[in-house]
């Protein structure tokens, strides 16, 4: 449309030397779009992307104490395999 060209007075001279506002498309991702996404897909802890958008949906973070390292890592792998299954 011509919303931005009229607001910012972006013009050209047509073949009859008459000043015209340009017609343009707007393909940019604005901060409003990002704000809406955060408002819709956020919670008290932050952004929660829908599964169709998020390539990684679960992150397993093993908390390792040296004496139990292998036990904790084994359990983390078991959980990973269950989730993949």
Image (cartoon, helix red, strand yellow):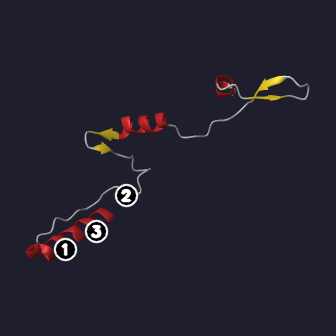
Helix, strand or loop under label 1: helix
Mark 2 and mark 1 lie on one chain; the one further toward the N terminus is 2
Residue 79 in sight here: yes
Callout 2–callout 1 Cβ contact below 8 Å: no
**In the picture shown, does residue 17 fall above or below 25?**
above
* Residue at 42% over, 38% down: 37
Task: Please name the residue shown 10% across and 73% down the image.
Answer: 68
Q: Which tag, 3 or 1, sits closer to the chain's start?
A: 1
Mark 2 lies on residue: 56
Q: Image quarter for residue 9?
A: top right
The numbered disc on residue 74 is 1
Q: Give x and y (percent) for residue 4.
A: 64, 28
- The Cα–Cα distance between marks 2 and 1, rounded to whole angstroms, is 21 Å
Q: Is residue 53 left or right of residue 47?
A: right
Q: Residues within 10 Å of mark 2 (few under 14, many from 20)?
A: few
Is residue 85 something one can see in this rendering? no
* CA neighbours of label 1 inside 10 A, class few (<14), some (14 to 19), many (20+): few
Q: Residue at x 14, y 74 (%)?
A: 69
Q: How far from the left and from the top, in percent, is residue 71?
A: 13, 74
> Residue 1: image x %, image y %?
69, 28
Q: Gap in Å between the C-alphas at discs 3 and 1?
A: 11 Å
Residue 81 is labelled as 3
Q: Point out the tag, 3 or 2, that comes first from the N-terminus.
A: 2
């Amino acid at each position: 449309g011509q919303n931005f060209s009229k607001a910012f007075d972006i013009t050209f001279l047509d073949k009859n030397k008459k000043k015209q506002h340009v017609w343009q498309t707007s393909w940019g991702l604005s901060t409003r779009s990002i704000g809406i996404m955060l408002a819709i897909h956020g919670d008290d802890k932050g952004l929660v992307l829908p599964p169709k958008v998020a390539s990684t949906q679960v992150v397993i973070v093993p908390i390792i104490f040296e004496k139990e390292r292998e036990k904790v890592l084994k359990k983390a792998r078991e959980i990973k395999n269950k989730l993949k299954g």
